[in-house]
Amino acid sequence: MQPQMALLWEVSVFEFVLVTMVLGGALAYMIGRSTALTWSGWGLMTFYTLLLTIAARFIHFSLFDGTFFLPLETLGTAAYYAGIDFIVLMAFAAAGRMWTRKLQTQRQYGFLDRAA
């Protein structure tokens, strides 16, 4: 595939949606859910999401001829698209964390919702 180099995706819209939003988004959601269930902090979730971002960049590189961090010529481009991936994945992780915390709070403090 020939790179399109758009603002959000590097190779194609299909590649960005498949790798970053579907596969990475599902995994990031589970990262947020697991950190909420274990009562871990936002820092650990951010670290795990950073590791997931590196893995997503590797999938972009290996399957769709995207850029990766190691050749220094492509470091700037890879860092830019890794930032985009990180922001998207962090949004999915935060959504998973907040949804799980909402359910935990409703289950634990359900009596607060009932009006007298």
Image (cartoon, rainbow, N blue to C red):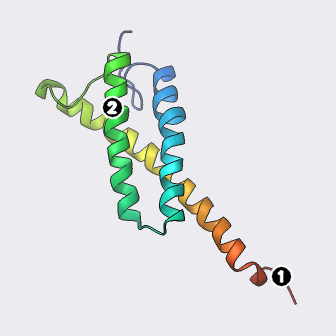
Q: Residue at x 47, y 51 (%)?
A: 31
x then y, percent, for residue 29: 53, 48
Q: Residue at x 88, y 90 (%)?
A: 116
Q: Name the residue rendered at 31%, 28% in the picture.
A: 58
Would you name the residue on which mark 2 appears? 57
Residue 17: image x %, image y %?
52, 28
- The crowd level at tag 2 (other Cα within 10 Å; few <14, some 14-19, many 20+) is many
Q: Position of residue 35 (x, y in %)?
A: 47, 61
Q: Amino acid at mark 1?
A: Arg
The answer to whether residue 114 is left or right of residue 86 is right
Amino acid carrying mark 2 in the image: Arg
Labels 1 and 2 touching (C-beta < 8 A)? no
Q: Which residue is mark 1?
A: 114
Q: Which quadrant holds residue 71?
A: top left
Distance Cα–Cα, label 1 vs label 2: 47 Å
Q: Nearer the viewer, residue 81 or 45?
A: 45
Marked residue nearer the N-terminal end (1 or 2) = 2
Is 33 left or right of 12, judged from the image as shown? Answer: right
Q: SS of the residue at dot 1?
A: loop
- 10 Å crowding of disc 1: few (<14), some (14-19), many (20+): few
Local secondary structure at mark 2: helix
Tell me which corner region of the image, top left, top right, bottom left or bottom right, holds residue 69: top left
4 shown above or below 79: above
- Residue at the left extreme of this rendering: 72
